[in-house]
């Protein structure tokens, strides 16, 4: 008989992706990026706070020189659905002209946030722009956005763990799960 689930895991309805599944897929994604960026320096722009765990694990597998930048951008603002308005804190002086840029986020949902960020980066005339996400929801997008690297496609459910939160909680879970509606 399995031990009862305790702590924050008890708040999950179910585990969607285990730690082992996530780590294996992140390593595969990094291998693809190592081939793509061979003999180049890549400027990584990571969306915080949700992508923190994904980006940290992915970058540890990269074997190419990396410049890391972070930006805070979101359309959720504390709820479980997009507000439709992207709020962003773009660092002063951040310019990607002529650089190979890799934009990383935790999840592709409506496409709104990634679309706004891709537009901002593209306007700076980078040498190249590639986008990677750990998760992509199977749903209609508010905005079509190009994403070259996707870790997992998932159903349109609200997920937490591995950096993703609900009202600031659950980021520290090593897995990705669906919250218990109760």
Image: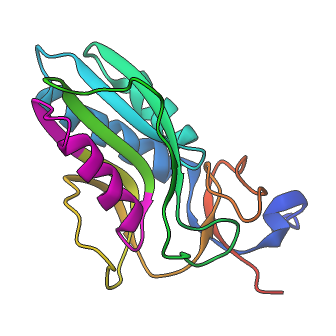
- Residue 100 image position (x, y, % from top left): 17, 27
Q: Quadrant of residue 9?
A: bottom right
Vertical arrangement, residue 3 with respect to residue 50, above or below:
below
Q: Quadrant of the C terminus?
A: bottom right
- Residue 177 image position (x, y, % from top left): 63, 67
Residue 108 within the magenta-colored segment of the rendering: yes
Residue 52 within the magenta-colored segment of the rendering: no
Q: Which residue reaches farthest front? A: 92
Vertical arrangement, residue 89 with respect to residue 126, above or below:
below
Residue drawn at x 37%, y 62% as measured from the top left: 152
Region rendered in magenta: 107-130
- Residue 119 image position (x, y, % from top left): 24, 52
Viewed as shown, does residue 110 lie left or right of 1? left
What colour scheme has been applied to the protein in the rendered image?
A: rainbow
- Total marks drawn? 0
Q: Nearer the viewer, residue 50 or 17?
A: 50
- Residue 2 image position (x, y, % from top left): 81, 67
Viewed as shown, does residue 60 lie left or right of 149? right
Q: Quadrant of residue 180?
A: bottom right
Q: Quadrant of the N terminus?
A: bottom right
């Amino acid at each position: 008989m399995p031990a009862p689930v305790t702590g924050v895991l008890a708040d999950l309805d179910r585990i969607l992706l285990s730690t082992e599944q996530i780590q294996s897929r992140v390593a595969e994604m990094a291998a693809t990026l190592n081939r793509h960026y061979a003999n180049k320096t890549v400027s990584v722009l990571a969306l915080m706070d949700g992508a923190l765990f994904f980006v940290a694990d992915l970058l540890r597998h990269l074997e190419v020189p990396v410049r890391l930048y972070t930006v805070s951008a979101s359309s959720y603002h504390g709820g479980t659905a997009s507000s439709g308005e992207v709020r962003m804190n773009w660092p002063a002086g951040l310019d990607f002209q002529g650089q190979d840029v890799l934009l990383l986020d935790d999840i592709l949902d409506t496409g709104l946030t990634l679309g706004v960020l891709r537009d901002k980066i593209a306007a700076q005339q980078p040498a190249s722009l590639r986008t990677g996400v750990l998760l992509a929801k199977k749903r209609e997008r508010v905005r079509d956005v190009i994403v070259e690297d996707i870790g997992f496609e998932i159903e349109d459910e609200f997920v937490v763990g591995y950096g993703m939160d609900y009202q600031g909680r659950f980021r520290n879970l090593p897995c990705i799960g669906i919250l218990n509606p109760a």
